[in-house]
């Protein structure tokens, strides 16, 4: 579970399994090499900074989604939680709709609201014993509805420069959003490697019945993980407002697909128990670099969507451990 395998253990692994471990990294390097040949502008400093900025929000989202998927669950509420958090932030800072103006104090509020919605996901999933995809889908739709109702379908444009700085600002030459994403990755890695529930997530995703017999608090861990995921989504909502300078109910449109794609492309198995937050970071950059390369080479938008759809099918095919599946449904 995250421990480094010994040389002897690695040597005993099937060749295909060893290839899977390094496949995402190899794909990323090959992709960068190919795009740099097709478009020399790809290697420019400005483009590198642009890639980091584009990858910031997906990275934060993936930090939450990875833990949920490692448990063998799925979270379809991403767009709803991001929308509510974004709308809340846009109304609590200088804007053209409300009179509130609490500046950066709106950030922790949005994160906590995201965590509360994540808690609702976990609580309903555990207590009602409903499938995670149905529970989170419902909460996600409810979030979109709440965000739409709050603004009445309109857009709140913000003028608070302290919030805009989270995206437009530069620190040591790199976007502030990229530094925030790095902080999210380090926090997620700390939780995965150094906290008990990080190990419990792998155990639940690998074999929930065995984990239960080992004394792992399954229900409590599931609720905690969904809550943590919601907090990451809340932070992504803040960054979305900072990036676009506005908040509205559809600000997160398309984020669900890109997030799940990045997590799976990075090598985290949808069946649970296999993967890590670092895998997801690689997945984010594969998806971001691919999108960036297609833009630089002039690929039409509708073709880009087709390529991304094909990418997730190939990634699932390569990452899925069929030895653990008795039935595919």
Image (spheres, rainbow, N blue to C red):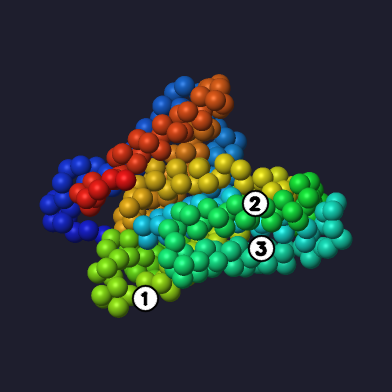
User: What percent of the width, then of the height, locates residue 95?
Assistant: 82, 54
Position in image of residue 309 (x %, y %)? 45, 33
Do the CB atoms of the residues marked 2 and 3 lie less than 8 Å apart? no
Q: Residue at x 81, y 51 (%)?
A: 159
Instruction: Give the numbered dot on residue 217.
Output: 1
Circle number at residue 110: 3
Q: Which residue is drawn at 79% across and 65% down?
A: 102
Q: In which quarter of the image is residue 274?
A: bottom left
Q: Residues within 10 Å of mark 2 (few under 14, many from 20)?
A: many
Seen from the viewer's position, the closer of residues 16 and 87 is 87
Q: From the viewer's perspective, is residue 227 above or below residue 319?
A: below
Q: Is residue 273 left or right of residue 136?
A: left
Give me the disc on residue 144: 2
Position above or below: 219 against 251 = below
Q: Describe the element under mark 2 as helix, strand or loop.
A: helix
Label 1 SS: loop
Write the residue at 66% across / 46% down. Answer: 251
* Residue 141 in sight from this viewpoint: yes
Query: Label 3 neighbourhood size at 10 Å, few (<14), some (14-19), many (20+)?
Result: many
Are there few (<14), some (14-19), or many (20+) residues within 10 Å of tag 1?
A: some
Q: Nearer the viewer, mark 2 or mark 1?
A: 2
Q: State the image quarter where residue 214 is shown.
A: bottom left
How much space separates mark 3 and mark 1, taking CA atoms?
28 Å
Q: Quadrant of the C terminus?
A: top left
């Amino acid at each position: 579970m995250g421990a480094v395998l010994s040389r002897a253990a690695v040597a005993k692994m099937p060749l295909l399994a060893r290839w899977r471990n390094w496949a995402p990294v190899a794909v990323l390097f090959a992709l960068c090499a190919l795009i740099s040949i097709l478009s020399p502008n790809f290697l420019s400093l400005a483009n590198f900074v642009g890639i980091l900025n584009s990858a910031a929000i997906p990275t934060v989202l993936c930090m939450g989604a990875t833990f949920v998927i490692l448990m063998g669950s799925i979270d379809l509420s991403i767009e709803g939680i991001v929308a509510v958090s974004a709308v809340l932030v846009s109304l609590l800072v200088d804007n053209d709709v409300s009179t509130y103006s609490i500046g950066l104090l709106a950030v922790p509020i949005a994160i906590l609201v995201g965590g509360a919605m994540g808690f609702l996901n976990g609580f309903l999933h555990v207590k009602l014993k409903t499938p995670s995809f149905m529970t989170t889908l419902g909460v996600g739709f409810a979030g979109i509805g709440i965000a739409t109702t709050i603004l009445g379908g309109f857009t709140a444009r913000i003028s608070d420069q302290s919030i805009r700085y989270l995206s437009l600002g530069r620190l040591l030459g790199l976007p502030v959003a990229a530094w925030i994403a790095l902080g999210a990755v380090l926090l997620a890695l700390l939780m995965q490697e150094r906290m008990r529930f990080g190990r419990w997530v792998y155990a639940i995703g690998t074999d929930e019945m065995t984990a239960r017999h080992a004394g792992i608090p399954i229900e409590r861990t599931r609720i905690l993980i969904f809550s943590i995921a919601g907090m990451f989504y809340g932070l992504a909502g803040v960054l979305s407002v900072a990036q676009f300078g506005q908040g509205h109910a559809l600000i997160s449109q398309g984020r669900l697909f890109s997030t799940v794609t990045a997590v799976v492309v990075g090598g985290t198995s949808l069946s649970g128990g296999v993967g890590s937050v670092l895998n997801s970071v690689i997945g984010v950059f594969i998806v971001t670099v691919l999108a960036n390369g297609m833009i630089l080479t002039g690929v039409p938008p509708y073709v880009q969507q087709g390529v991304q759809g094909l990418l997730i099918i190939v990634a699932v095919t390569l990452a899925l451990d069929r030895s653990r599946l008795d039935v595919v449904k």
